[in-house]
Amino acid sequence: MKLLQVDFGFKGPFGEDMANALVELANSINNEPGMVWKVWTESEKDQMGGGIYLFEDEPSAQAYLEMHTTRLQNMGINDVRGFIFDINQPLTAINRGPVAQVVQ
């Protein structure tokens, strides 16, 4: 399992408006190869958007990051930051991280 963290400058919409506007995109993300789950992140105060994703493997996370970066750039968002992390399963389990249920 690999964790992908993505963030970028974002001028909105935020909150309920964001949820309503991006339902179709959210549903499509469920079909990405290797994607287990996503937590959507937003900060209206800091004008940022992004997400935390769990992928089955590094190639799936890397492929998604490349596709998503291109998609955001096509929307005029150029300051995309993405990082792929390993997960320390024993410590994550202690703190009830949601990966404990899916990591094999």
Image (tube, rainbow, N blue to C red):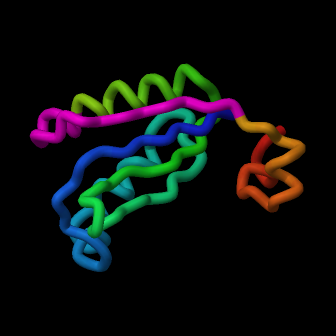
Tell me where the magenta segment starts and ends, as one range: 71-86
Q: Is residue 12 left or right of residue 85?
A: left
Give the image location of residue 53, x and y in percent: 53, 45
Q: Residue 76 colored magenta? A: yes
Q: Is residue 40 left or right of residue 21?
A: right
Q: Residue 58 colored magenta? A: no
Give the image location of residue 62, x and y in percent: 47, 24
Identify the image quadrant of the N terminus.
top right
Q: Does residue 53 sit above or below 17 in this rendering?
A: above
Q: Does residue 31 sit above or below 84 in this rendering?
A: below
Give the image location of residue 99, x and y in percent: 73, 50
Give the image location of residue 27, x and y in percent: 38, 57
Residue ID at (56%, 51%): 37
Query: Between residues 7 and 23, which one lies in front from this camera angle?
Result: 7
Residue ID at (37%, 51%): 50
Residue ID at (75%, 56%): 97
Looking at the image, the residue that sits furthest to the front is: 46
Query: Between residues 28 and 101, which one lies in front from this camera angle?
Result: 101
Determine which quarter of the picture holds residue 10.
Answer: bottom left
Q: Is residue 27 left or right of residue 76?
A: right
Number of on-image labels: 0
Identify the image quadrant of the C terminus.
top right
Q: Is residue 99 left or right of residue 35?
A: right
Query: Between residues 51 and 44, which one lies in front from this camera angle?
Result: 44
